[in-house]
Each structure stands twice: as structure tokens, then as C-alpha cells.
Amino acid sequence: MTTNTQITRTSNLPKIIHYAKEFLFWFVLIATFLFSIFPLYWMFITSLKPRTDVEMTPPTFMPFVDYQPTLDNYVDVFLKDRAGAGFAEADQEATRKISEFPTTLTNSVIITTVTTILAVLMGTLAAYAFSRFQIKGEADMRFFILSTRMLPPVVVLIPVFLMFNQPGELVNNALQNIPISFIQAFGESIKDFSLRNSYIGITLLYITFGLPFVVWMMKGFFDEIPKEYEEAAMMDGYSRLEAIWKIVLPEAFPAMLATSVFVVITAWNEFVFVLLLNRDNATTVPPFLFSILGYGQVEWGRTAATSVLFLIPIIVFTFLARNHLLRGVTFGAVRR
């Protein structure tokens, strides 16, 4: 009898270990998910809280149970009174006007979209060249490209500010040394040109910082695509450009989309450069979000509502790219 019981316990031991591992796996997975998602949940419910409940102690967690949600904070994001404050319950509708948020959100969309398209396009072409052709000094060139990512962008903050503040004057000083009248006249005409407070300046800067990442990511993807595909296409009469357009790019599209997600997130969230260079014009949402904090009492409800609205476009873009994202990040091209 004892022997049969021991045999039964021994035979059940692997099942017990299996169920214990399964339970531990799902427990850790769910706990990690809740830990990661809680800040987003807290931001969302804070955006729905009345001002009296935002700083309540102990805090409230459940809308419609602990408090009645309100959209006043979202109204305050888009509207403000003449003094610049945004308190929906205190302002009269006749005294309120549109805030800077719609403009800054539009600027973020324009700058991020142009940055992503140009950075991914130019970086993809450069990566293709590095992958397919024997380029003299290729290792040094790739190291130089990578070296631009070794230091945080804030290190070059002062040089970038000086370069953006007076590029026209710098070019004019150089052109005045050329003894040709129309060249000197051209230098005088662009003397006051500045890249500050412009879409062009901040977009060029974001492209500059995004290109190294695109080149290094896309080169690895192109290395995974067999060269024989292009060679077969060119033997059938395609040109090099036609082979790239019809053969290579469709295979590399998941990688391009995955890379663009990271470029979008970087440009969308950038704060320091746009605050320094575009404080007065063509500014984006992060500086606007910072201005809400102010120097007095923090409007946590309005800040949370702005953050939710600022986060939605990134969530939508990532959701639309989800089918290609995993395949692209895991070197989704055809393997040898």
C-alpha cells in the first residue's frame, strides 16, 4: 500500500512541477503587465478627475465608483481664459479662447512626419549602398556614423544653438572673401537668415539625429536579403533602381516600418532642442506640456489630459504597424 502511494506521488510530481511553472510564469507576466500599465491607467483616470479629487488623500482609483468623471480637464487643454489659465469650472465661455495645444499638436505631426519620411528614405538608401557595394573606407564611414550616437544630443546643444542662430551670417562672412560681386551680393541677401523658430531647422536637426540609427538598422536587414534576387531581376532586364523598387524594398518594408516607429517616437518626444530653438514659433507639444506645470500650483488634471491626447497618435501609429513591427525587429527579411 505504501509502495503504491509513493509511486502515485512520484508520478504526479512532474505534473505538479509543470503546473507550478505555469502558475509562476503567468503570475510574473501579469504582475509585470500591471506594473507597466499602471502609470498609463493612473494618467488616464487623473485626466477625468475633478480638481478637488486630483490631490485627494487617500487617492481614488475607480471612476464612477470613487468619483464622477468629468471632461473639464480636456476642455482646459483646448481652451483658456484671457489671462492664460485654463479652469473650466471657473471661466466664462465668453472670455475663453483657443489654447496653443492644437497648434503645437499640428506642429508635432508635421515635423515628426517629415522627419520620419526623409530619415527612413535617406537612411535606407545609404544602408543599401553599404550592404551591396564595396566602398573605400566603408568601415571608417560606418564608425563615423555610429559615433554620432555615442554621446547624448545635449552635449552638442551650444554648438547647435550657435549654428542655428546665425547660419546666414556665417555663410555671408565666408562668401565675402570671394572677389565676385554677385556671390558677395548673395551673401548679403542671406545675412539675416536663421534656422531658429522654423520647421526647416528643427526638422533638419531631427533628421540628423535619426539617420545614424536608420542606417545601422537597415544595413543589418539588407544583409539578410540575398543578392541573387536583384541579380536575377537585372538579368531579366530590370535596371538597378527597378530591382530595388520592385524586389528589395517590398522585402525590406517590414524593417523600414519597424525602424520608422523608433524614429517617430524619438522625434515625437524630443524636448530640449525644440524648447531651446523653437520657443516662439513652430514649437511642439513637449514644451507646451512643460509650460502647464508652471511655477505655482501644478494643474495635474490638465497635465494628465494633455499627456493622454499627446500619447494617442503614437499608440494609433504603433497599433497600425503592429503586424510588421515584430517581423521587422527580428530581421524580417528572407534569410539565407
Image (cartoon, rainbow, N blue to C red):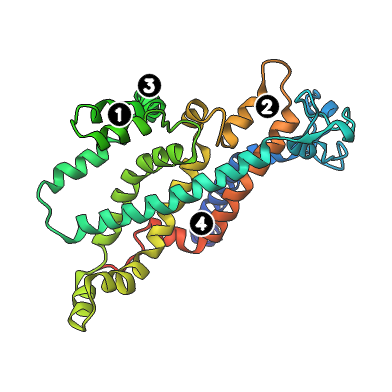
Q: Amino acid at mark 3?
A: Ile
Q: Which numbered mark, 4 or 1, is in the foreground of this view?
A: 1
Instruction: Kindly report the distance in space between the C-alpha atoms of the residues bearing marks 2 and 1.
Output: 40 Å
In the image, residue 93 lies at what x, y percent? Answer: 88, 35
Q: Earlier in the sequence, mark 2 or mark 3?
A: 3
Q: Amino acid at mark 4?
A: His
Q: Earlier in the sequence, mark 4 or mark 3?
A: 4
Instruction: Kindly report the distance in space between the C-alpha atoms of the residues bearing marks 3 and 1.
Output: 21 Å
Q: Earlier in the sequence, mark 4 or mark 1?
A: 4
The answer to which image quadrant residue 129 occupies is bottom left
Disc 4 designates what residue?
18
Residue 172 badge? 1
Quarter of the picture holding the N terminus: bottom right
- Classify 10 Å Cα crowding around label 2: few (below 14), some (14-19), many (20 and above): some
Name the foreground residue: 315 vs 84.
84
- Classify 10 Å Cα crowding around label 3: few (below 14), some (14-19), many (20 and above): few
Q: Amino acid at mark 2?
A: Ile
Disc 2 designates what residue?
292
Residue name at image x 63 percent, y 48 percent: 312
Instruction: Kindly report the distance in space between the C-alpha atoms of the residues bearing marks 2 and 3.
Output: 26 Å
Q: Earlier in the sequence, mark 2 or mark 4?
A: 4
